[in-house]
Amino acid sequence: MNRLSFIGNSTLDAERLRRLLTGVFDVQFVELARVGGERPDRFTVIAPDYDDAPSLIKLRQWIKLRPKDGRMVFVTRAESRVENAQAHALGATGVVHRPIDSAELLEKLWDDIAVLGDTTPGFGALGHQGAAAAQDSLRDIFSAASLGDALKATAIESAGAAVVNDIEANGLSTWIETVRSHHSQTYQHCLLVTGVAVAFGQHLGVGSADRKRLSIAGMLHDLGKARIPISILEKPGPLDQDELAIMRKHPEYGAEALKTAEGFQPEMLEIVLHHHEYLDGSGYPHGIGGNEIPDLVRMMTVADIYGALLERRSYKPPMSPQKAYDILLSMGPKLDAALVRAFASVTKVAA
């Protein structure tokens, strides 16, 4: 779970914040007078004494040490323009007012992940109802995960059925061409993986119910990215080592968000947590392998890798379906060889 530092003078305020953010953040109280001993965490909420000039000067210097993607949210009184101005002068990345509203605070801390889905590509108007339903479902999934709200299983299942119908009616190649137009790298990836997973199930001959299950898994698999800074998620270039380390936390963040949700089959949690694990034990986050990885997770890992290779990004063109498949083949013992062989039929309809 992400750690959040609460900087202030009141342990009662810290305890209230801890209750507000239960299940989303591990809140640690740091007395204002002790600021300076350690560098700032990536997530910090600060409730200073705005009349204490010496402590504010010290606080300003300390805030300059924050991580590149650090979030510094100040607590102010809504009626005080002076406090709001002081907060921004000190280096606030966001401001919330007393009494703190958890949804407002989480939006400030997460860079408002919902912004990724605000500018829709108009899938519905173009006749792609499945893509439109999946896009809307992803927006709800990411918003709920970032704000600590309950995921709506019924709505996600409905979107899953619409995706299955779309792939059956229009084929995978049309789906790929359609969803590549999404402005968000994160949404584009999730939509590609969802379509690829459904097509995989279709070519394996599984029933409609199981294809819907694969569709739901595709939409849910990366929900932990709701707790990754947008600057990393949408970076127009390769991630550096520090950014990659943060990105690799998303399976665990997703599992934390899904554990409290109701109405989902147990294997969805396995997919969210383990879709980056490899059979040879070289994956993450737990380095499990072999029989520890269920068949459905193995399928989603293949779909996830293939979908990522097909993405259109600002710094690289999309890979051809055949070249992407060649990379799957080259991964050898990392992936289920039988599933990779079976996936060849999906490659033929992706072009």
Image (tube, grey):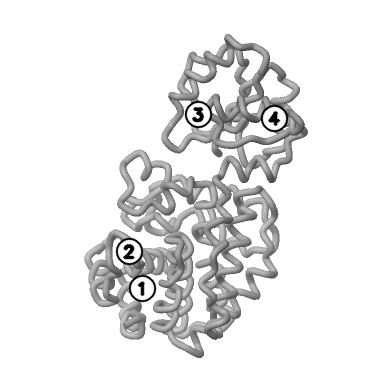
Residue 137 at what x, y percent from top left?
60, 67
Q: How crowded is mark 1: few (under 14 residues within 10 Å), some or many (20 or more)?
A: some
C-alpha separation, residue under disc 3 versus residue under disc 4: 27 Å
Q: Do the residues labelled 2 and 1 touch (CB within 8 Å)?
A: yes
150 up-or-down from 21: above or below = below
Q: Nearer the N terminus, badge 3 or badge 2?
A: 3
C-alpha separation, residue under disc 2 versus residue under disc 1: 8 Å
Query: Element at badge 1?
Result: helix
Residue 117 at what x, y percent from top left?
55, 62
55 up-or-down from 224: above or below = above
- Badge 4 amino acid: Arg
Which residue matches tag 3?
41
Q: Nearer the N terminus, badge 1 or badge 4?
A: 4
Residue 320 at what x, y percent from top left?
27, 75
Query: Element at badge 2?
Result: loop
Labels 1, 4: front one: 4
Residue visible at 36% across and 45% down in the picture: 244
Please indicate whether residue 241 sits to the left or right of residue 246 in the image. left
Residue 141 at what x, y percent from top left?
60, 60
Query: Element at badge 3?
Result: loop
Labels 1, 3: front one: 3
Q: Do the residues labelled 3 and 4 touch (CB within 8 Å)?
A: no
Q: Are marks 1 and 4 in contact (CB under 8 Å)?
A: no
Which image quadrant is residue 305 in? Answer: bottom left
Residue 207 in sight in this render: no
* Residue nearest the observer in this picture, 95 or 106: 95
Q: Nearer the N terminus, badge 3 or badge 4?
A: 3
